[in-house]
Image (cartoon, grey):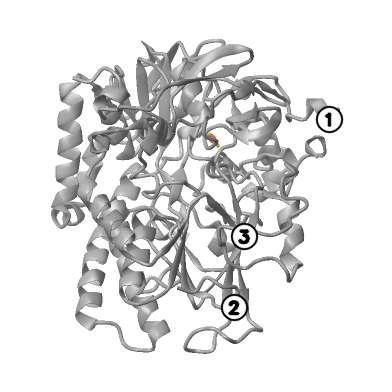
Amino acid sequence: MPLSASEPYDLAVIGAGSAGLAGAVTAGELGLSVALLDTSVQTGGQFYRTPAPTLGAVRPEALHHDWSAYTDLRRRLARSDVRHLPGHHVWSVTKDDEEGVGGGAGDGLWAVHAVTGADGGGERPVRVRARAVLLATGAYERQLPFPGWTLPGVVGAGGAQAMLKSGLVLPGRRVVVAGSGPLLLAVASSLAAAGARVPAVVEASGYLRYARHPRALATNPHKAAEALIHGAALLRHRVRLRPRSAVTEVHGTDRVEAVTVTRLDRDWRPVRGTGRRIACDALAVGHGLVPQIELATALDCATRPLPDGTRALALDGLQETSVRGLWAAGEAGGVGGAQLARLEGELAAVAVAARILGRPAHAGRVRELGRRRERMRAFADAMAAVHAPAPGWPRWLTDDTDVCRCEEVTAGRIREAVEDLGARDGRTVKLLTRAGMGWCQGRMCGAAVACLAARGRTAEPPAERRPFATPVPLSALATLDDPTMPLVTESEGPADDPGGHTTTTFEPDASPGDS
Amino acid sequence: MARTPAELVGAQPGPPFRITFDGRAVTALPGQSVAAALWGAGILAWRTTRVGGRPRGAFCGIGQCYDCLATINGEPNRRACLVPARPGDTITTQEGHGRAALGV
Ligand code: FES
């Protein structure tokens, strides 16, 4: 195993969820040396998020679907030589073209830059070098703002799920689940199974719209089965499903006390006089998932628009991005679920191995994986189309609704930037209002701001350009040009890192008050 | 039917321990993040915003939104949803940009 600075890895995999795990173990089994970096201490990504071993969960699978697929990957990882690097927050990937010492084709080497520690708190900067990189960075939740969504007790639907799976906690006892997309059903059924009352699942789209995609449904029967399983669980827990509705207001002063659920027309505009108050102490909300692609777009990788207005990486038939040597698998190429992610991770690994080892990939295996990939991608596209936000949703907003949670920029100020000052895209709105300039760098508000800037026309999806994929301590940046910095993460870490314990964090657009 | 998440997964955690939140004792389980321990105690907010002074806590749960920033053992701007709780941790509500102590 190449552990010394002079010997780079064949493949660096970023993300240890379904796609990254499948990619890493497959590449390892094909003879490549592999480093697998992930922010979390445990493998599994968001889908297979598990409680820490010290919580002693005897039946972690009670919170999961398709658990055996994960235990299988975990077993293969344990048997492999793959170097698992947990607690590594990757903030940049760069190409070192001058070196010319890479694999096969004389390509340069990739450098993957990370900061370590539970929350990337700058414990130490790390650089991993590799001949090829597989991005398996997954997705984060899309949020559409509404009055009251910043009140404590309003949490992301995925966030509620994540906290439940890893920390075995609930945000409240009576939790309304709202937004759009199939994740809502999974979240509602796990919250209910874990003891929460779920008075309603509020879905902005209508499920009947799936009927417009008969082929995608017919060729993906397991997806229909999944929906039935969730549906049955919801029935058992007496959860009411309210399609074509949205939470248009949250009530409470210090925390959630109730929500107003309003019917929507087909453009997602609230129908007057249909608001109904539902008492609850928490609201779990999300409007689908956004591919997390900023490491790739920083390298100028081509992207493609998805039917729900988000953007994913454009990939070829073998999962390679438009940048040679940089592959992607799973949600970064379009949100399609864990099964598709596993398959794409495997396909990418087969392709990387063929390139690096200089021999053709097994044609039969590639064909079969490619065929199944197309089928599942078709379903993913249908799903994205069904749950795509319709143009009327900004009618939920009042002028004083915060759109950007970090910088507390209201809908009124964004409207002013668009209507009075002529902003036409998210970037201009950002410059005029500071929306998207805070800690999260627009991850929470980017989709909404782009929509508001488009004034009801189809929004240009945000380009997801962020100079840093995670805030980075200045000390980590300072070591970038330092030739003495260790290249590979052995347990020793950098020998001397004078600034390594500072909490100074570089924020690209931090306000003067922040530094 | 399970009444708690711990029952659902048959959790047999290691011995619980104490942390404090704004001086109040909170029980945490080994393996829980600071945010999870606070949620477990029914605490949903541990930060006030810079502009409006509004309460906030964990939102995304996975390290993306930075709404969960807390002052942990005197260090501001730690993402509570990612930082594991440790015995004796002192969590304090983070006000504004979290650098009040520095006077900036
Ligand atoms: S809850 Fe979003 S970063 Fe911690």
Residue closer to the observer: B62 or A448: B62
* Dot 2: element: loop
Residue closer to the observer: A204 or A343: A343
Answer with the quarter of the image where residue B48 lies. Answer: top right
Task: Name the residue that disc number 3 marks.
Answer: A126
Whether residue A317 is visible, yes or no, is no
CA–CA distance in space, label 1 to label 2: 43 Å
Give the left or right position of residue A223, taking residue A158 as reference.
Answer: left
Residue located 41% across and 23% down the image:
B15
Q: Is mark 2 within 8 Å of ligand 1?
A: no
Task: Name the residue that disc number 2 marks.
Answer: A6
CA–CA distance in space, label 3 to label 1: 29 Å
* Dot 1: element: helix
Density class for disc 2 (Cα within 10 Å; few <14, some 14-19, many ≥20) is few
Does the CB distance between marks 3 and 1 fall below 8 Å?
Answer: no
2 vs 3, front mark: 2
Q: Label 2 lies in what chain? A: A
**If the picture is divided into quarters, which one holds ligand 1?**
top right
The x, y position of residue A114, in whole percent, is 60, 57
**Amino acid type of the residue that numbered disc 3 sits on in the rendered structure:** Val
Q: Label 1 lies in what chain? A: B
Q: Are marks 1 and 2 on the same chain?
A: no
**Amino acid type of the residue that numbered disc 2 sits on in the rendered structure:** Ser
3 vs 1, front mark: 3
Q: Are marks 2 and 3 on the same chain?
A: yes
Q: Label 3 lies in what chain? A: A
Task: Name the residue that disc number 1 marks.
Answer: B102
Give the left or right position of residue A227, taking residue A156 as reference.
Answer: left
